[in-house]
Amino acid sequence: MDPRHRDGLLALAALAGVFALGAGGSMTRPVAAAVGVFGALAIEVLFYRFDALLALWEREWVRLGGLAVVLAGGYVLALVAGPWTLAALAWGLITYLGLLVVSLGRRPEPRGE
């Protein structure tokens, strides 16, 4: 399976979990959208800049642990800081999925053969 497809399925699972925890009620809050979008873009920049992060992400236990951290951390954040944090996680996941769709739609670059 293409890693992008695998990561997309993982992001969809996380998004479903975040909505099940109660993200829907705060999705219209601008601060939640801003935090989520900019957070997702910052994480993508880190993965782009540091190959070690991408190599770490290729380990299955890291990916599954990341899903657990998003869901458990989102639940705790919602209890401590309010439900808008779940909406921020949802916006971040939606942003990632949008970037993924764009990357899947691009033609592969020629290898110079």
Image (cartoon, grey):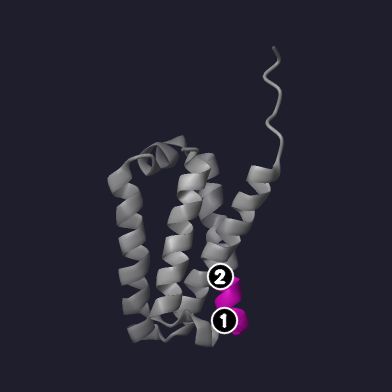
What label does residue 11 carry, if any?
none
The residue under the point 37% across, 65% down is 70
The residue under the point 57% across, 65% down is 94
Label 1: element kind = loop
Q: How far from the left and from the top, in percent, is residue 67?
A: 36, 59
Mark 2 lies on residue: 91
Picture mark count: 2
Magenta-span inclusion, residue 70:
no
Q: What stretch is highlighted in magenta?
A: 28-35
Q: How far from the left and from the top, in percent, is residue 27?
A: 57, 81
Q: Is residue 2 above or below residue 63?
A: above
Q: How far from the left and from the top, in percent, is residue 42?
A: 55, 56
Circle 2 crowding by C-alpha within 10 Å: few under 14, some 14–19, many from 20: many
The residue under the point 44% across, 40% down is 54
Side of 81 relative to 38 (left or right): left
Q: Earlier in the sequence, mark 1 or mark 2?
A: 1
Mark 1 lies on residue: 27
Side of 80 relative to 10 (left or right): left
Side of 62 relative to 35 (left or right): left
Quarter of the rendering containing residue 106 = top right
* Quadrant (top left/top right/bottom left/bottom right) for the C terminus: top right
The residue under the point 47% across, 80% down is 23
Whether the residues at callouts 1 and 2 have beta carbons within 8 Å, the answer is yes
Q: Which amino acid does label 2 sit on?
A: Trp
> How far apart, in angstroms, are the residues tagged by discs 1 and 2?
8 Å
Q: Which amino acid does label 1 sit on?
A: Met
Quarter of the rendering containing residue 10 = bottom left
**Residue located farthest toward the top when viewing the structure as drawn:** 113
